């Protein structure tokens, strides 16, 4: 399977603090790859560097073999790297559907299966798909987005990211602050997104839920890759689970 994303010897500095110390990771097309670890391990710094929000001090990042290190976020979005951010960042004053449509700003007319489709037509098609995935968003499409529950806002944030038709979807702490039942539902939706062909890189503290859906996992500790492997293999490693995954 082809590699969608490659991170090679990545270094990230915040002033004199080295947050990421030469990590390597890759994401195969069509897979869910997870980055796990405790607070301060470097998870969010890694995903924000892939997204261009944080600049790398060294190393390189490749998207399907093309070097994209330190490109601006809007240029990365145009290439198909779309992030659903930590904290959701719902746009207040806009309805649910208006929030979703903001996510489609980078869509362009394209040819699919020999048929040219306008950006407007694509937006309508993707919006329909998002509403199928998250029926509650359709039910509340005219509602002010800021009045949704935390779980509904997380669904909205993911749906908004999907409106850009991402090649690589970046999820930063999608379970943060949510009740356990809602967390399970969110992870079920993430699995469904993968099954429809979207490649996903997820950063999470909820190790067990993440391991249930991930194809491959990197465990970070103090800016370095402490362990990596298939999720089912890591789940069997009792010592690693207790030490790094809160088991």
Image (cartoon, grey):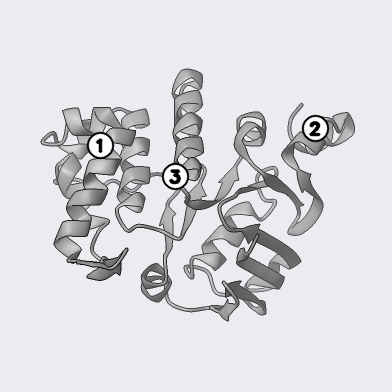
The residue depicted at 63 percent of the width and 53 percent of the height is 43
Q: Name the residue that disc number 1 marks.
A: 131
**Residue 19 in the image: above or below residue 180:** below
Instruction: Evaluate if marks 3 and 1 touch, with contact meaning CB atoms under 8 Å apart.
Output: no
Mark sitting earlier along the chain (2/1): 1
Q: Secondary structure at mark 3?
A: loop
Q: Secondary structure at mark 2?
A: helix
Residue 165 is left or right of residue 66, and the answer is left
- Asked if residue 176 lies left or right of residue 152, the reply is right
Which label was assigned to residue 196? 3
Classify mark 1: helix, strand or loop: helix
Give the image location of residue 20, x and y in percent: 70, 65
Q: Residue at x 35, y 52 (%)?
A: 161
- The residue where tag 2 is placed is 241
Residue shown at 52% from the left, 69% from the top: 54
The span from disc 2 to disc 1 (Cα, nearest Å) is 37 Å
Q: Quadrant of the C terminus?
A: top right
Please state which of residues 47 and 1 is positioned toward the viewer in this rendering: 1
Return the residue nearer the eye: 127 or 121.
121
Kindly identify the residue that appears in the image at 70 percent across and 47 percent down.
216
Q: Nearer the viewer, mark 2 or mark 1?
A: 1
Q: Earlier in the sequence, mark 3 or mark 1?
A: 1
Q: Earlier in the sequence, mark 3 or mark 2?
A: 3
Disc nearest the viewer among 3 and 1? 3
State how far apart marks 3 and 2 are (Cα): 30 Å
Image height of 142 relative to 165, above or below: above
With 223 as the anchor, is 63 left or right in this view?
A: left
**Marks 3 and 1, Cα distance to the nearest angstrom?**
14 Å
Q: Residue furthest front?
A: 114
Q: Is residue 60 above or below residue 123?
A: below
How many numbered markers are drawn?
Answer: 3
């Amino acid at each position: 399977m082809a590699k969608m994303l490659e991170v090679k010897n990545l270094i990230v500095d915040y002033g004199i603090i080295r947050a990421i110390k030469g990590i390597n990771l890759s994401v195969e097309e069509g897979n869910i790859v997870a980055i796990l670890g405790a607070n301060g391990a470097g998870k969010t710094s890694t995903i924000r560097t892939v997204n261009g929000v944080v600049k790398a001090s060294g190393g390189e990042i490749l998207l399907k073999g093309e070097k994209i290190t330190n490109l601006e976020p809007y240029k990365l979005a145009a290439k198909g790297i779309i992030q659903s951010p930590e904290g959701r960042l719902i746009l207040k004053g806009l309805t649910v559907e208006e929030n979703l449509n903001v996510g489609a700003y980078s869509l362009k007319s394209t040819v699919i299966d020999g048929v040219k489709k306008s950006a407007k037509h694509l937006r309508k098609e993707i919006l329909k798909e998002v509403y199928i995935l998250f029926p509650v968003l359709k039910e509340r499409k005219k509602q002010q987005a800021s009045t949704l529950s935390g779980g509904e806002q997380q669904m909205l944030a993911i749906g908004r990211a999907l409106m850009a038709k991402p090649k690589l979807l970046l999820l930063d702490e999608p379970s943060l602050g949510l009740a356990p039942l809602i967390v399970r539902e969110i992870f079920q939706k993430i699995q469904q997104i993968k099954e429809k062909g979207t490649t996903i890189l997820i950063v999470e503290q909820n190790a067990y839920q993440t391991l249930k859906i991930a194809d491959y996992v990197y465990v970070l500790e103090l800016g370095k890759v402490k362990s990596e492997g298939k999720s089912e293999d890591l789940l069997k490693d009792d010592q690693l689970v207790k030490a790094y995954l809160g088991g």
